[in-house]
Amino acid sequence: MGGGRSGPRREVLVIVLPIKAPEDLIQSLCKDYPHLRVLYHRALPDKSIPEWLYREATILFTTRYLPADPKKDAPHLRLIHEYVAGVNWMVHHPVYKDPNITITTSSGVHGPQIAEWAVMTALVQSKMYNTLYEKSKEHHWNISSRLRHDLLQTRDKVGQRVGILGYGSVGRQIARVARAMGMEVVAYTARERKTKESKKDQGYVVPGTGDPEGDLPSEWYSGTDKKSLHRFLGADLDWLVVAVPLTPATKHLLGAPEFKILSNRMAFLTNIARGPILNQDDLIAALANEPEALLLGAALDVTDPEPLPPSSPLWKLPNVTITPHVSGYSANYTERSFDILRRNIQLLEDGKGYGDLINVVDKDRGY
């Protein structure tokens, strides 16, 4: 399978996940790739992983269950497929540093469900849903003149501008839904995307979703310096979606100066990436200091730290929605992650090298 080898060989796929074995998905793999030996181990709390499993593996499909010393404990291992999208937690692990081990991620499987969460929480705020829901519990149809006045001042999304900081699979699906609501999409990526080919989504795409060709943004900014970032944030954004990976370069990427720029339009901020990308103290100040607040509100599926302590001021802010890092949850998650693995196994079958696989981690960039 790939890497210069000729003809099918008996690859050993070891799957170590904290879920019940998805027998139908495993059986389908075995049926389509009869030379593939599949070993499944359900990871349980406080239970170690049998060492012999790693020694057998040529392909490892897992989350955070890695061999401590890959050269010694997993001498045949050449490919790790991660059940999650982010790999910031493993950059110092020997597996990550091993040049003979390719790592792929499940980036792309989250697009539909995270986009739904992002749009839902943004609308909960803009449509004053929480207030209306609490009023419904009183079993009264009529509302106060003050509430009616406030509702009449709410704006729909038509013509508003959403800035997507990190135009990957999740950002592209949010763009797709936002465009359906009549919004303008403004994209930001680290690398320039001036050509039609460079704008394409090169990763895993759930069929019928996202922006595979990169056609949706009306404006596309790029760069890795603050000046470029500030130019993007100053593009009259009504809604900012943070969707970049956490790396040393993106830690505290957004703080007081950036929130000040966003205050020109009193933007709403959504973070579905990682908590430390935002300076959380600056975020609280930007949200809490009425009438001098810099942001309209925020929806946070991630915080810094996690779990968010009960004492955090964020919990008490009425213009903030907080969920415990669950926006990516979906009954379709496992099936889609297996689909990435299946496609990569087929690429290896077709003679492609490990560097040609889908969702390969660039170890230098950290994602």
Image (cartoon, rainbow, N blue to C red):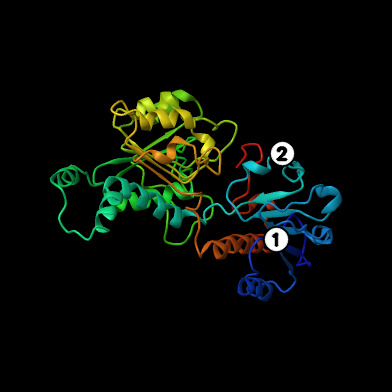
Percent x, y of residue 191: 51, 35
Q: Quick one: 168 or 264, which is closer to the camera?
A: 264
Q: Residue furthest right?
A: 72
Residue 337, disc:
none
Residue at left offset 65%, top offset 36%: 364
Q: In this picture, is 88 found above or below 222?
A: below
Badge nearest the viewer, 2 or 1: 1
Find numbered disc 1 in the image and state the secondary structure of the residue it sits on.
Answer: loop
CA–CA distance in space, label 2 to label 1 = 24 Å
In the rendered image, is residue 241 in sight?
no
Q: Are marks 2 and 1 in contact (CB under 8 Å)?
A: no
Q: Quick one: 123 or 212, which is closer to the camera?
A: 123
Which amino acid, by three-letter code, is at mark 1?
Leu
Which amino acid, by three-letter code, is at mark 2?
His
Residue 44, disc:
1
Residue 92, disc:
2
Q: Residue furthest left?
A: 145
Q: Earlier in the sequence, mark 2 or mark 1?
A: 1
Residue at left offset 45%, top offset 57%: 113
Q: Is residue 88 left or right of residue 261?
A: right
Q: Is residue 30 left or right of residue 229?
A: right
Residue at left offset 71%, top offset 38%: 92
In the rendered image, is residue 1 in sight?
yes
Label 2 Cα neighbours within 10 Å, binned few <14 / some 14-19 / many ≥20: few
Percent x, y of residue 260: 37, 25
Looking at the rendering, in which quadrant would you find the N terminus? bottom right
User: In which image quadrant can residue 28 be found?
Assistant: bottom right
Percent x, y of residue 31: 67, 76
Q: Quick one: 79 or 52, which is closer to the camera?
A: 52
Label 1 Cα neighbours within 10 Å, binned few <14 / some 14-19 / many ≥20: few
